[in-house]
Image (tube, helix red, strand yellow):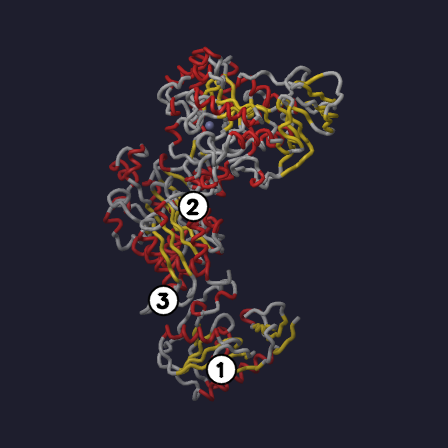
Amino acid sequence: MSRALLDAPDVARVVDRIAHQILEKTDGATDTVVLGIPTRGVPLARRLAARVHAFEGVEVPVGVLDVTLHRDDLRLRGVRALESTVEPPGGVEGKLVVLVDDVLYSGRTVRAALDALRDLGRPRAVQLAVLVDRGHRELPIRADYVGKNVPTSQAENVRVLLAETDGRDAVLLERQEVAAR
Amino acid sequence: MKHLLSAGDLSRDEALTVLDTAVRMDEALAGREVKKLPTLRGRTVVNLFFEDSTRTRISFELAAKRLSADVVTFSAKGSSVSKGESLKDTALTLEAMGADAVVCRHAMSGAPHRLAGWVRGSVLNAGDGTHEHPTQALLDAYTMRRRLGRVDGLRVAIVGDVLHSRVARSNVLLLHTLGAEVTLVAPPTLLPVGVAEWPAAVSYDLDATLPKADVVMMLRVQRERMGQAYFPSEREYSRRYGLDRHRMGLLPDDAIVMHPGPMNRGMEIAAEVADDPRRSTIVEQVSNGVSVRMAVLYLLLGGAQ
Amino acid sequence: MSTWLIKGVAPYGGDPVDLLVADGVIAEGSAAGAQVLDAAGLVALPGLVDLHTHLREPGREDAETVQTGSRAAALGGYTAVHAMANTDPVADTAGVVEQVWRLGREAGLVDVRPVGAVTVGLRGERLAELGAMADSAARVRVFSDDGMAVHDPQLMRRALEYVKAFGGVVAQHAEEPRLTEGAQMNEGVVAARLGLTGWPAAAEEAMIARDVLLAAHVGSRLHVCHVSTAGSVDILRWAKAKGTRVTAEVTPHHLLLTDDLAATYDPVYKVNPPLRTAQDVAALRAGLADGTIDAIATDHAPHALEDKETEWGAARPGMLGLETALSVAVLAMRETGLLDWRGLAERMSAAPARIGGLPAPGLVVGAPASLTLVDPAARWTPDPAASASRSRNTPYAGRELPARVVATFLRGEPTVLDGKATR
Ligand SMILES: [Zn+2]
């Protein structure tokens, strides 16, 4: 069973809004880079950078930050394939880094991302942008930019689909037999 | 992947995943001061070495430690292993310790297969008798890919004591899976009966093979084989099957020279060939070994079990 | 002595008859007072005779004893077994063979016929006192260094000649030792892949070729143990065509199993000579069917758990065979149409009795009532834990087999009834 939380036009609107918020909160995105967390954080980061550029003509460097090797919850799932970490042009040293992920849930991915980020350098500040915040945090972590807050039960699953990875844009709420995290 | 016992167990996709993962490991550690990732924190890796092999043991130890696993090493010397305790008893002990993975090196072919039937954790074959040494083949393929950009379509000559070589067996299987063309070059005495069924060509003539090889992999030849009439003398062996400067000149321009070590300089490989900075990958193979073993440990232990 | 009326049994799978067993022989006349055994649907065969059994006593009573081995034999339909000489101490003196023979009598389940060693201590250096063993209470007629070959050709020639004096036969474990140093399995494609040292077929064939030439030269009888290769069958066929007095046996496992089982590295499949290829199996079946190979012999080789639950290279070679031999023979030979029940009885009873110097078994009136009753329709799956043997090393665990022994009689007394040993 699944039900759509956001459809394609909703996703586009939400991305636009976050792009505007980033421009506001980062003083026009100066010295700012976006780092996507694989899998779907990466196309989201690219879209945000593209929208920022469209609105204000600012080039925001985009990078990829694979956090798998830093996760502390690997035992809970099958082995994940590792993705390349790609430093944004110009690096992260002294920059304002906006981490981008699709769903914020327990907060463990973000914690791993903060650890992984340390290997790339020392940013001036780190912010977090997510498409969906579904609650149930297990760590003191919150997002600076949230596309949509969705109260969920742990028996539910939030699935983000993006054209780049899944052929279409949507956010679905699914009920599942066993809650996987 | 539950165990890694034979290079032949790996599908093409699985083998490529190991190689890709090894690249990620390299990237993740590049430029780090502390070469350590938290990935396998809380996992226990037991290195069970019934046969002495300092380089393989250290390579696995480093790989496990760089992923923050707890590492315990049993070596043949100074442990119950050398006191006649059976493999089965050792397996039960490891079970009791809760080993998540057992890296097993053994002088008898198939010992890791037996172990895999007796322990719940993953078993990694780190070289068993004259059978296989799958991580060596993976690190060799990794080295080829780094040096030559690919494995698919490469012409690889494996030269020497194929009969007794676990490195040759694993390489033939893995390289075939990855699309390379393998030619085994050896005196007929050092090729197994039944080699015709292997996915590899066979030649007795090294000079004829070298001009068509992108990779030449020299195998260690033990001097004791001479006494068993596999070949008449060291001199004759190295004259017919050793890689010296002259023979190296027969190779295509960008061909590389590999050796799994330890080398018999002057026997199967001349010192000047082993040390040739352009062609020889021998030192690189050692460092690549750590990355590949990290990749394998991650793929075996980095998920739910 | 008890009297039995075995009702409705089919001798050699033929028309059902009632068999009267009285005073230890197959009898005629009144069945009054006889215990009745309803044998409808069962096949009667003369008691099976094994030429090649390792009973391990004295020396390795942890693996098997004469008692446990005898029980396994009776359950397999056997009424006589030849106990191999490679015990500890070796059965190379009258004293040891008499001890084994006496233990067999005490167990009372099968006739235990000790095999005498050809050479002292199986060392292949000098002849054991073959005559003393022949003259002993054990009346040894089969001599063998089984486990290893009598390698020295001169010694082999002398042994072949010497045993003529008392109608003995040398049973050779044909293996050229220099060609099998460190050997772990059949040399071939599978061994090459598994990295296990190969045991070449030529090591067996070369020894058989030498021995048939020697036997022909001195006009002696030769028996070849556990023939395992297609080439050996060819050599035997050639020798027999020339009139050489050679007989040969094949094991049940070499009629069924092949070397690819070694891929498990489970030493339950490690045996000497090793399992060979499917081509060899086919040639062995054909050779057994056409009489080139005279007999099926089990090479029943019990081993303690610690000798099998180990690395392949550290394990001892050998498999259990007594309880499964008839079923495997039915599977390999009868269900393939190569031998009928009478043919199986010839290969598993009459021929081995002849080779071992025992009276000819038969299901005729007046013959000793040593016989076995087989349910030809039964299917069963060997369970190592349920084996009567003290060891567990059957290669057939979990493999469904046809035909099952229901009852066995040794000279008129039941040793097995309802598939269970009587003692
Ligand atoms: Zn034998």
Q: Is residue B264 above or below residue A49?
A: above
Question: Image point 47% across, 12% down: which residue?
Answer: C166
- Amino acid identity at mark 1: Arg
Residue type (three-letter) at the residue carrying disc 3: Lys
- Closer mark to the observer between disc 2 and disc 1: 2
Neighbourhood count class around disc 3 (C-alpha, 10 Å): few under 14, some 14–19, many 20 upward: some
Q: Are marks 1 and 3 on the same chain?
A: no
Q: Is mark 1 within 8 Å of ligand 1?
A: no
Say which element carries label 3.
loop
Q: Secondary structure at mark 1?
A: loop
Asked whether the viewer can see residue C287, the reply is no
Q: Which residue is mark 1?
A: A142
What numbered label is drawn on residue B111? 2
Please provide percent x and percent y for residue C247.
52, 19
**Which residue is disc 3 drawn over?**
B36
In percent of width and height, residue C28 lies at 72, 16
- Residue C178 percent coordinates (x, y): 37, 28
Chain identity of mark 3 = B
Query: Assess mark 3: CB under 8 A from ligand 1?
Result: no
Disc 1 chain ID: A
